[in-house]
Image (tube, rainbow, N blue to C red):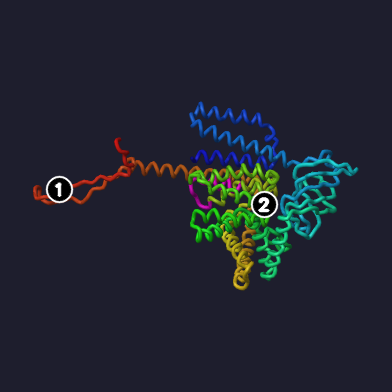
């Protein structure tokens, strides 16, 4: 079981980085099929591994490879002409817009058409990010027409003007609900820092005051705590399942309680990390064994998201979310040691941080746990502040100041490193895991040797009555931990 967990999680991690970075290796399915088949044959012939489990594992591995290649092909932008001639694009927003420091909005849209500077129109496909000037929140699902040009790197469309077209009824309802909830938080919470934090934790929206918290969390290595992710959705899952279980029982409570988190994801938008957490929770409700539940949820959720949400797999939010959860599931096959969860999460996401920012932060190893507890408390308080005011608002304000102090203290610790330090961190972590694992196996063998294959003898008190006076003489009782033999054995 441990070998299966290690092999599967490492395969997902390699596939994840290859998909997000749009590796050219995903364009050779025949070569990959021959390689995977050759490795499977070697394992079957040389190491005599179980045929069924080996073929099933490698077949699923190749399925992930094929889905990853299709997702990358759908995500790569294609305009039908040289990119430098591009002057206008049209598409549909995949996610809600995000505010930047320059008071502009960043959007990701799925292309449908493009125009050249001469007015020629071509069909376009793929996904492109755009930067545009507006104070309004743009809702996912909106059809939008942008005019401008591509940046020099070709990965960002610089918009000079835009026009929003049709928006579905669901998008209109989402916009109304988000505006109403934002209005409630602004009127309930007077403190600007607490209000901006509540908007981030509940609705995933940023304000001008949010960037101070984001900078502090980035310096503390805890930037993932403020972005909507599976950790935040877990709060809704636990509260909803607990409340439903009070009336429907544990079995139906978990299943009916799934509806409220589903509605929450529909409200705030299909962010990759929220979709991942929702899929894994849904799949975990199926009757898998306890040992295979986490691994099966990861593999199936990853495959479903590659298939149904292929346009989101090249975003860094997708990469960070799956890299962290994959290493956490890998930790189930590793021996226990202090700070294992955070250490493995940093190990999986540090390469993505170096790709994105050029460095990675080790401060999260010390501060992620207390900051995470505060974030959970703040999210619950923010939720309570929506219908009520008074004491919850005061507690939210005080806890926000505590979080600011903690992040400011963590930001002063110089734990920002480059690639060389990551290799050293990986070496130290693997060495510690190997030492702890060896010590555990040695202790287990020592216990078995002392107990003589777990056969234990227990002697009762001796009966000192004279022989022939009734009763028994010296009595002995044998007790063993070995399982009972079946009848007729």
- Which residue is drawn at the image coordinates 77% and 42% (left, top)? 125
Location of residue 29 in the rendering, given as x and y in whole percent from the top left corner:
66, 32
Name the residue at the right extreme.
118
Residue at numbered disc 1? 472
Please state which of residues 43 and 288 is positioned toward the viewer in this rendering. Answer: 288
Q: Which residues are magenta?
A: 323-339
Q: Residues within 10 Å of mark 1 (few under 14, many from 20)?
A: few
Residue at numbered disc 2? 271
Please state which of residues 117 and 404 is positioned toward the viewer in this rendering. Answer: 117
Q: Residues within 10 Å of mark 2 (few under 14, many from 20)?
A: many
Name the residue at the top extreme.
45
Instruction: Name the secondary structure under disc 1.
Output: loop
* Magenta stretch encompasses residue 222: no
Instruction: Name the secondary structure under disc 2.
Output: loop
Please state if 133 lies on the left or on the right of 403 as rendered. Answer: right
- Disc 1 and disc 2 in contact, CB within 8 angstroms: no
Please state if 152 lies on the left or on the right of 36 as rendered. Answer: right
* Viewer can see residue 218: no
* Magenta stretch encompasses residue 328: yes
């Amino acid at each position: 079981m441990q070998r299966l967990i290690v092999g599967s999680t490492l395969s997902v991690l390699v596939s994840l980085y290859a998909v997000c970075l749009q590796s050219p290796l995903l364009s050779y399915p025949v070569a990959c099929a021959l390689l995977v088949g050759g490795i499977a044959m070697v394992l079957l012939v040389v190491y005599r591994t179980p045929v069924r489990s080996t073929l099933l594992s490698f077949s699923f591995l190749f399925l992930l490879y094929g889905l990853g290649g299709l997702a990358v092909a759908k995500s790569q932008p294609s305009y039908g002409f040289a990119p430098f001639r591009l002057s206008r694009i049209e598409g549909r927003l995949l996610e809600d817009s995000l505010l930047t420091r320059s008071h502009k909005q960043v959007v990701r849209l799925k292309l449908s058409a493009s125009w050249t500077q001469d007015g020629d129109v071509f069909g376009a496909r793929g996904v492109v990010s755009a930067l545009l000037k507006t104070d309004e929140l743009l809702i996912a699902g909106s059809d939008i027409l942008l005019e401008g040009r591509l940046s020099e790197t070709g990965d960002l469309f610089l918009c000079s003007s835009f026009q929003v077209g049709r928006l579905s009824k669901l998008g209109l309802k989402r916009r109304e609900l988000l505006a109403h909830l934002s209005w409630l938080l602004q009127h309930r919470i007077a403190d600007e820092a607490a209000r901006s934090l509540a908007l981030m934790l509940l609705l995933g929206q940023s304000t001008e005051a949010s960037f101070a918290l984001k900078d502090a969390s980035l310096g503390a290595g805890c930037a993932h705590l403020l972005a909507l992710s599976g950790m935040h959705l877990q709060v809704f899952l636990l509260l909803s399942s607990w409340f439903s279980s009070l009336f429907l029982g544990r079995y139906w409570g978990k299943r009916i309680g799934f509806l409220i988190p589903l509605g929450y994801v529909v409200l705030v938008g299909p962010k990759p990390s929220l979709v991942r957490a929702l899929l894994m929770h849904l799949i975990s409700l199926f009757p898998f064994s306890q040992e295979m539940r986490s691994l099966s949820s990861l593999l199936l959720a990853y495959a479903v998201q590659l298939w149904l949400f292929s346009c989101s797999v090249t975003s860094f939010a997708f990469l960070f979310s799956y890299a962290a959860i994959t290493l956490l599931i890998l930790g189930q096959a590793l021996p226990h040691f202090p700070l294992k969860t955070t250490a493995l999460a940093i190990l999986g996401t540090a390469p993505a941080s170096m790709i994105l920012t050029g460095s990675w932060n080790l401060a999260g190893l010390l501060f992620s746990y207390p900051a995470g507890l505060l974030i959970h408390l703040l999210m619950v308080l923010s939720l309570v502040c929506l219908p009520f005011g008074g004491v919850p608002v005061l507690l939210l304000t005080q806890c926000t100041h505590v979080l600011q102090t903690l992040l400011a203290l963590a930001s002063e610790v110089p734990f920002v490193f480059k690639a060389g330090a990551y290799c050293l961190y990986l070496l130290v972590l693997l060495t510690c895991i190997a030492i702890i694992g060896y010590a555990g196996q040695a202790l287990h063998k020592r216990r078995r040797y002392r107990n003589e294959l777990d056969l234990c003898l227990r002697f009762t008190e001796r009966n000192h009555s004279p022989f022939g006076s009734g009763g028994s003489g010296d009595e002995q009782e044998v007790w063993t931990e070995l399982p009972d033999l079946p009848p007729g054995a």
